[in-house]
Amino acid sequence: MIDKNRRSLMLAATATAALGVFGLGATRLAKTNKKIPVANAQFGINLAGVADWSSEFPFVDLFKQSRAWFVEGKQPAEARLNLDADGWVTQLPLGTVASTIISVLGNSHFPSGDYVILYEGEGVIKVPNHDYKSIKPGRIVVNVNGEKGIFRLDISKLNTQNYLKNIRVVPIAHEETYQQNRWNPTFLARWSGVACLRFMDWMNTNNSQLVAWKDRAKPSDASFTMNGVPLEWLVDLANQQNCDAWFCMPHKADDDYIKQFALYVKEHLKPELHAWVENSNEVWNGGFQQHKDAVIAGQRLNLSQDSGEAALRYYASRSVQIFKIWTDVYKGHDRFVRVLAAQAAYSPVAEEILAFQNAASDADVLAIAPYVSFNVPAKDEKGLDDKLVSAWNLDQLFEHLNKVSLPESIQWVKNNKKVADDYGLKLVAYEAGQHLVGVGGGENNERLNNLFYSANADARMGDIYTKSLMMWAQNGGDLTCSFNSVGAWSKWGSWGLLQNHDDAPSSSPKFVASVKWAISRGQKMAI
């Protein structure tokens, strides 16, 4: 289930571009008179999404990555769990137990040890499968051993007049400091020196239904897996890491939301750091709800009756509106970066966005995702289907990556760099890295998946990353944000530079290659 929604969309998106259904290229407005900016290629990272299956453990308080409350064996309509505004259970149906999963990592990679469970209110909390060390009102100490299975909490009884709330699950060594130091020190050390943290997945950007500021993610939320990580924490992390922060505005957010967000960032992000401001994520991608909503909005405003063109034009128009709200808040735009994003594989998408109503004049960068891609479907007109490719050895796979996928990525960069130059914008990568994945049924071929896992762990993948990053700089690319930080590899993709929080960095060729390149660009990172 990891990143299924995020990355299984690429086949449809690529097919859309190949068919040319956007209807682009017939007309083009005058280009801006901006000078071509000087690029300074730097390494940034997309942080992997927060979930109970996360293997990164960025927070000291593990409850912040917990799953939504559920009643085992019951459908939500049958369970009828009542929650307060912050997500705490206020009432249990008769004879039921409310459960949440803190971590599904029932293996040696879970950070086993003594944890203190702190809480307010009255009730009974149980921890199945793991060993209690002490139980007192408001404080339970339990030894959690990943080898004994998932880490789960059950509420079997509660006082509805003083229900259980503010539950925290903290390594006992951090009990006295977690309120002042909310970040896992290992997490901070790993990403020290990055130029920028992109918070797309941490903000639950894709398919967001968020509109009003009052409904935003808040620090008081029981868990951050439902509404995303709150802005207060995002800014705090960027400040701690002394790096830029890339924010993706919810595509349905109203103007007041945008204004309040910008006000907080202006007042709390270190003045020497930059906020990167993007309207949603991949609005060009037909697999996401933000694209479907942009089609409707663009057609309603008579921007075009062609669905793809309407989406791109609405995206351009709404992005400029967002940028202007931020500019009003900041009294200028020197401290934030205005991002217009497009599809790497089909540069006319960028041209349409930048040209519409001269949107490029209100932007600073064109962002693309120049992956080294090999998406293998169950059926392919060229014959490169999952059955054929799964029979390859690693030599054959890397030959294809070096002779086909990498040159293709380089050409995408060149095509989009020309467009960016035409409009006086920097070219940046909102995502980048390898993109080896089965699609359209190919993801169910276990032999193909094993081939891709082996390739991601192979030293030659480090060479691919090195070549790709060097190519990026040589062709005038600026910031590039790898996708993504730490996450288990699955049939939905091998996105994590590392698979687990406790992996030796030197064991991952693509992590080593990325950090070495960052160091070569003057960044103070460490392997």
Image (cartoon, rainbow, N blue to C red):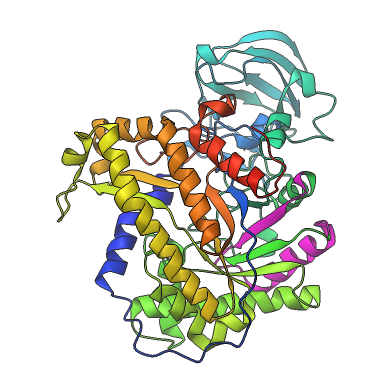
Q: Residue at x 66, y 75 (%)?
A: 323
* Quadrant of the frame with the N terminus: top left
Q: Position of residue 239 (x, y in %)?
A: 79, 49
Q: Position of residue 378 (x, y in %)?
A: 19, 46
Q: Residue at x 38, y 52 (%)?
A: 406
- Specify whether residue 248 is painted magenta: yes
Q: Residue at x 79, y 24 (%)?
A: 174
Query: How many numbered circles are shown?
Result: 0
Chain part drawn in magenta: 241-270
Q: Is residue 254 placed above or below 35 in the rendered structure?
A: above
Q: Which of the 4 image quarters holds residue 186?
A: top right
Closer to us: 508 or 295? 508
Q: Is residue 212 placed above or below 128 in the rendered structure?
A: below
- Left/right placement of residue 79 relative to residue 216 reads left
Q: Position of residue 190 (x, y in %)?
A: 66, 35
* Quadrant of the frame with the C terminus: top right
Closer to us: 434 or 247? 434
- Left/right placement of residue 356 relative to residue 454 reads right
Q: Position of residue 288 (x, y in %)?
A: 42, 60
- Specify whether residue 501 is painted magenta: no
Residue 181 visible? The answer is yes
